Amino acid sequence: MDITEVFINRYGRLRSGWRFAVFLLALFLLSGVFGGIFGAISYYLPVGLSATGLLGFLIPQFVLLTLAVFVGWLCGKYLEGLPFRALGAWFTKNWLKDLGLGLLFGAASIGLAALVTLIFGVTTFQFNAMAGSAAILSTLAVSLGVFAFGAAAEEALFRGYILQTFARANLVLFAVFLTSLLFAFTHTSNPSANYLSFINTALAGLWFGAAYLKTRTLWFATGLHLAWNWVQGAILGISVSGINEITVAPLLQPANVGSTVLTGGDYGIEGGLACTIALIVSTIVIWFAPFLNPTEEMMDLTSREKSNDADTKIENRKNSKSLEF
């Protein structure tokens, strides 16, 4: 066997595993650089940045989003000859429709999880009478922005270039399971995390992976992610992956909380079986929904690798000019 085949595939490109490694290495190096810069800035600020404060959540997510998109674009351009829009983060056709449907499905899915706890009588919800209307409105607005950056950042990282480059190498199932496990592992350090929360987070990764594959953009998956977190925390008053600091004055509050097997206890509903049921049902509905389809352009940009012949090279050069979308 030619040693070059270990690194180069039959299309004359770096193999997907090496492309994955290049992406991770570049992301790691740039994260270190920008993390150091923001760390130095925060050190000299007159007011320190709390790790549990809103900026403590927002700045890392903003940096992650920016780097995941930037490095994903660079890897797609120089390793696979793809334009920026192939990443699924640009305003391509149907982006607004996909985002809107994602928001609806996400809200309905967390609503189903909460409904399960109501049906089994382990939770009730009541209006948050302890917080004033100004505090509630502020929480609804601010948390929406924070959760939007968080959802966009995590989807750009896990359903962005990593999943997509393996999918183009005809390793779709591997890509979805790998990114789902990586997604779950990043939540193991959250407060009150447990084995069931790990399983549910991995299931959520499969859910988001199915959302990407059905539309071939990040908009639908980001809408799902955002609505799930925001409705869960700011509307229902449930801990979001063990975190309460972002939604200090939610609209509702859970009361009479019973079985932690269903409700998830301190971690929130994502650590309970009610979440498991909702994610499985929502994933099945999304996968078989006839109205969720990618555009021809996105299907072509995200499908299996094509021959690296002269015509393809010319077309790729046309599509890949600088930041031409």
Image (cartoon, helix red, strand yellow):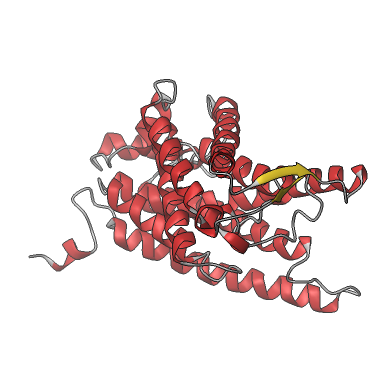
> Which sits in the foreground, 47 or 147?
147
Q: Is residue 50 above or below residue 101?
A: below
The location of residue 276, given as percent across then percent down, is 45, 48
Q: For the point 61% across and 69% down, which residue is it?
A: 191
Q: For the point 78% across and 65% down, which residue is it?
A: 53
> Which sits in the foreground, 289 or 252?
252
Q: Quadrant of residue 211?
A: top left
Residue farthest to the left, as pictured: 1
Q: For the point 60% across and 56% down, which residue is it?
A: 268
The quarter of the rendered structure image containing the N terminus is bottom left
The location of residue 151, given as percent across then percent down, is 60, 49
Residue 324 visible in the current orientation: no
User: In the drawing, does residue 224 fall left or right of residue 292?
Assistant: right
User: In the drawing, does residue 210 fall left or right of residue 168?
Assistant: right
Q: Is residue 116 above or below residue 293?
A: below
> Which sits in the foreground, 136 or 293?
136
